[in-house]
Amino acid sequence: MADAFKARYSSGAQIRTGKIRSAAACAAAAVIVSRRLKVRSQKCTARKILLEFQEACYTPLARLRQVVDAMAVEMHAGLVSEGGSKLKMLPTYIDRLPDGHERGLYYAVDLGGTNFRVLRVQLGGLEGRVIKQEYEEVAIPPELMLGTSEQLFDFIAKELVSFVAREGQDFRLHAGQNREIGFTFSFPVKQTAVNSGTLLQWTKGFKVNDAVGEDVVAALQRGIERRGYKMRIAALVNDTVGTLAGGRYWNNDVMIGVILGTGTNACYVERAEAVSKWAGDIPKSGEMVINMEWGNFWSSHLPRTYVDESLDNESLNPGEYGFEKMISGMYLGDCVRRVLVRMAQEACIFGTPVPHKLLEAFSLMTPDMSKMHHDDSSDLKVVAEVLKRVYGIQNTTVGIRKIVVAVCDTVCQRGARLAAAGIVGILKKIGRDGSAANGVIKRNTFEQSDMNGFHDEVPVHYTSGGRTVVAMDGGLYEHYTKFRNYMQEAVVELLGEGSKNVVIELSKDGSGIGAALLAASHAEYVIS
Ligand code: BGC
């Protein structure tokens, strides 16, 4: 009896234990299911945000064509009158570009992005060309970007004179020749001569308030004199103009200079007669280089989103440089970050609370965006690494990482296609978009570049029409492969057959040497 009771009792206990176990298993399964459901719903919300953003950024061919037309129209308007357009279309007083005859020793200083550069070059005329060059680069101390004009120009002068002091025997000044300098200053300047001009406003995170309205050449000249040196600033040039000049030195077909780097801009060779607002004499060459300051271009056809609005509102120059904020290296990473913030807040894709650092403006730099975008590992481990390193975000699923890559792709593609539309807008304005060419293709080839220091970027095709070369510089174009590819594809899409006459050449660091070449061609002491 007792045994029977025991047996019954113990089997009852087993049943209870079994029930408890299965209840626990059920609860665990429920947790897993609910976690999966939560992840799925997070992903679903994140996808919705992505889709909405992709739609808002969409740049189909028809829209790009509208941007091209708007660019050409605004160029016209900006040439007609001061303030006629958001495109500043600034005459540069450069009416002749280097042609290879330049001789002697020249210097260049280059202030424009995150780095400052000094350079010297010994030019040997048509036979010798660039005999020797040397340069040095230093990072600009961040406090100088927001300090006073005197501090900034003193820093430039100090770096310049210490570089000059280290001039070696291989570099020679002609007897009686002063050191002449090309000053690349990559901000909007209203020039009053080839070697003077006042700063209109700052861009790219600089804000040295007392320099606005000041003659930047005089400011640098004072800095040099304070250090007891005698040098002459022979030319003040925008980096686009330096790039154009550096390109033209090797190749007569170079008509346009473009920078796609921290900031973005373009310049081109215009018929002087087309510059109606120009009050001076028409130069002998009949031409004038125009610094467009295309970063400030605006058109209702640009695909503006909530991301662009918030970025602009929180920038150092709200309401200004809207095109630059959609295209250039300073801003692309931050556009991506802003979409990720929305996903983190509304879909909790990075858990709760939202990682603090993600809320910090400019915490995602474009080089990191580019790394994530180019991640071709099956589990997107580079994306995981960047999210962890920059934001301390761990344990992301591959699905979420894919969404992050798609955001990078959307921002990159939009910027690249808009840059392409900008270039085609210039080609259209100067009648070189192929619409006038007869389009007979004689031969297609990958041409070896004849431009010293230039690399071939796109297949070069000859037609019976002339070709136009765009000299390009800037880290965004050079290092962000997918950006470069999207841009080139869009140029071909827009120009069709006409693209066979257009070559985009990377002119690496062309702007420094271009400024030195312009100093040579505008020198006080001309060596023949
Ligand atoms: C400046 C331009 C410059 C461009 C590229 C822009 O922010 O306004 O003058 O050419 O950046 O450096």
Image (tube, helix red, strand yellow):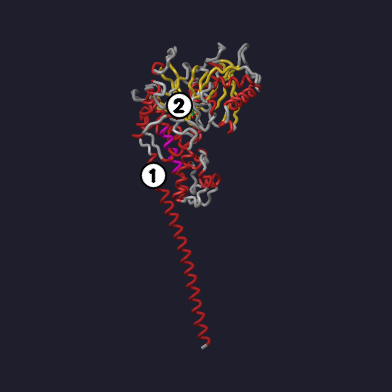
Q: Which mark is residue 52?
A: 1
For numbered disc 2, what is the local secondary structure?
loop
Q: Is mark 2 within 8 Å of ligand 1?
A: yes
Q: Is residue 453 above or below residue 287?
A: below
Which residue in the protein does label 2 denote?
A: 293
Pick whichever, 258 or 76, lies toward us.
Answer: 76
Q: Residue furthest front?
A: 210
For numbered disc 1, what is the local secondary structure?
helix
Q: Residue at x 62, y 11 (%)?
A: 176
Work out whether residue 304 can be spotted. Answer: yes
Q: Is residue 337 above or below residue 438?
A: below
Would you say 154 lies left or right of 236 here?
Answer: right
Whole-number angstrom distance, CA of label 1 to CA of label 2: 31 Å
* Secondary structure predominantly adopted by residues drawn in magenta: helix
User: Mark 1 or mark 2, which has the lower sequence index?
Assistant: 1
Provide the residue span drawn in magenta. Answer: 407-418
Three-letter code, disc 2: Glu
